[in-house]
Image (cartoon, coloured by chain):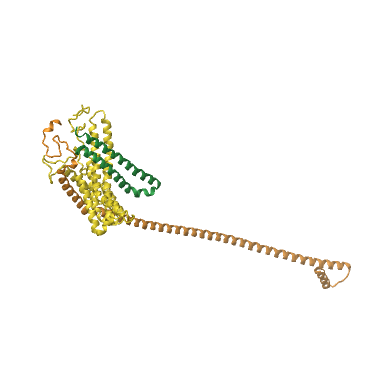
Chain colours: A orange, B yellow, C green
Amino acid sequence: MATETTAESASACVGPNGSAIGMPQLCGEWVGNQVFWLILALVAIYFVLDRVALPRIQAILAERQGTITSDLAKAEELKAQAEEAERAYEKALAEARSEAQKIAEETRAEIRQQVQDAQDKADAEIAARTAESEKQIAEIRASALANVETVAKDTAEALVAALGVNADKSALDAAVDKRIEG
Amino acid sequence: MATETQGGDAAHGEGGGLVFHPMDQFIVKPLFGDGGVGLFTVTNATLWMALAVLCVIGLMVLGTSGRGIVPGRVQSVAELAYGFVYKMVEDVSGRDGVKYFPYIMTLFMFIVFANFLGLIPMAFTTTSHFAVTVVLALAVFLFVTILGFVKHGAKFLELFWVASAPLALRPILAIIEVISYFVRPVSHSIRLAGNLMAGHAVIKVFAGFAAIAAVSPISVLAITAMYGLEILVAFIQAYVFTILTCVYLKDALHPHH
Amino acid sequence: MEGDLAHIGAGLAAIGSGAAAIGVGNVAGNYLAGALRNPSAAASQTATLFIGIAFAEALGIFAFLVSLLLMFAV
């Protein structure tokens, strides 16, 4: 470093060895240059931002907002559709359930009807048989009664004949009838 | 060169024991040739400002050229920057401040890129020069003052007349308000340049200590820590500059307290 | 050395950096205390926090600047 002391320094603010004299920030001869380039830089940035970058970013953000909004609307619509489908499904399910219940009910009623019919038929048959049996019993009883009458009359005639009385046959029958009925 | 030093190499610096002057990094020098720095000379300041402009274009124009509904990496950053500054303007300055959003965005993008580019080793930090920050702050100050007078005419002066204070106090408060109003561009510019200059100078000071073998590990650690802090400062100072601009803009748009 | 008094002045001016540190700490600490008490309001006040820190820090930067001026410009 010490060997460089011979170097020419072009500025009043820079020492002969390339080191600053005082604060470089306070060096007056550099101010104009910096201000000039700064203003140029600021104007350049301003025009680039104002004309190109900011409108573009604004457009991008607006577009994204629009996309998000429309996507949300679409999602809302899809959700409504899904809800509707679910409602239709629920309805179909309920219908199927009630249908099944109805069929079961019908089947049950039919079976009950069949059972009832069979029972009725059996009842009727039993009743018919009973009536027939009763009729036969009545017939048997009537024939038995008639036999009893004949036997009684015959016995009474024989008795009367044995006693030696010559009784009228019709009178004898009437008397026996009277006794039997009484 | 400084490896054999025991602090006795005062010959290198002008007065201190440092190997190099911590302010050397702020020297403006021509990129081509050894001539003086004229008004239109292409200097290292020009180079780094141009790089900042190119970075802004790269991020905000090339990065968004895809116009993707689903943003890519660079486009996300561009949109983030847009949303960040837009929300700041809207929140602080109000709805009618949104009209001036491109100006504020310009300031923010320039400062944030100049700050971060300045953190590249061997880079020149354009925003560490008062010449630059004073122009930025004066631009804001003049813009806001003229806007206030154009919008509200003489009523803009009500900004200095605190109607809610007791009548006797108002003239005193008015004086204070006027002074604070005119100190605004000063503090606005010195805050930015001062923060950056301070950080970079401190890094250089620690770098100078690194030449002394006994303390060099500590100094390297300190440089690392300072560098991390400077990354934070680079962003926060851009943010603060921008939000103060928004606050001043709000004062111009709504001068009534 | 001719710059001796200036160097002492620079050192004294650097005390201002410490004062600014106290100020920044105050701002951030009070913000944190308030934010913990009412976390829902914390997010809306970050801008105010940064403005407060910037104002406090600016004064420290002024002190640092004075010290730099004494070191390098006087």
Please tell me whether residue A159 is drawn above or below residue B142 in the rendered image: below
Count of marks, rendered view? 0
User: Relative to the observer, which residue lies in front, B74 or C21?
Assistant: C21
Instruction: Examine the rendering and report whether any part of residue B220 can be seen.
Output: yes
Q: Position of residue B117 (x, y in %)?
A: 22, 42
Q: Position of residue B198 (x, y in %)?
A: 24, 40
Q: Does B216 sit left or right of A124 as displayed? A: left
User: To which quarter of the image does residue A173 belong?
Assistant: bottom right
Q: Does B95 sit left or right of A98 as displayed? A: left
Q: Where is residue B230 in the image (x, y as percent from the top left)?
A: 26, 40
Q: Does B32 sit left or right of C9 as displayed? A: left
- Split into 4 quadrants, where in the image is the C terminus of chain A? bottom right
User: Relative to the observer, which residue lies in front, B248 or B104?
Assistant: B248
Residue at the limit of the structure toward the front, as seen here: B168
- Split into 4 quadrants, where in the image is the N terminus of chain A? top left
User: Relative to the observer, which residue lies in front, A82 or B55?
Assistant: B55
User: Relative to the observer, which residue lies in front, B75 or B101?
Assistant: B101
Q: Residue at x 45, y 59 (%)?
A: A91
User: To which quarter of the image does residue A55 belong?
Assistant: bottom left
Instruction: Examine the rendering and report whether any part of residue B68 can be seen.
Output: no
User: To which quarter of the image does residue B25 belong?
Assistant: top left
Q: Position of residue A51 (x, y in %)?
A: 21, 54
Q: Does C60 sit left or right of B1 as displayed? A: right
Q: Which residue is drawn at 38% across and 46% down?
A: C34
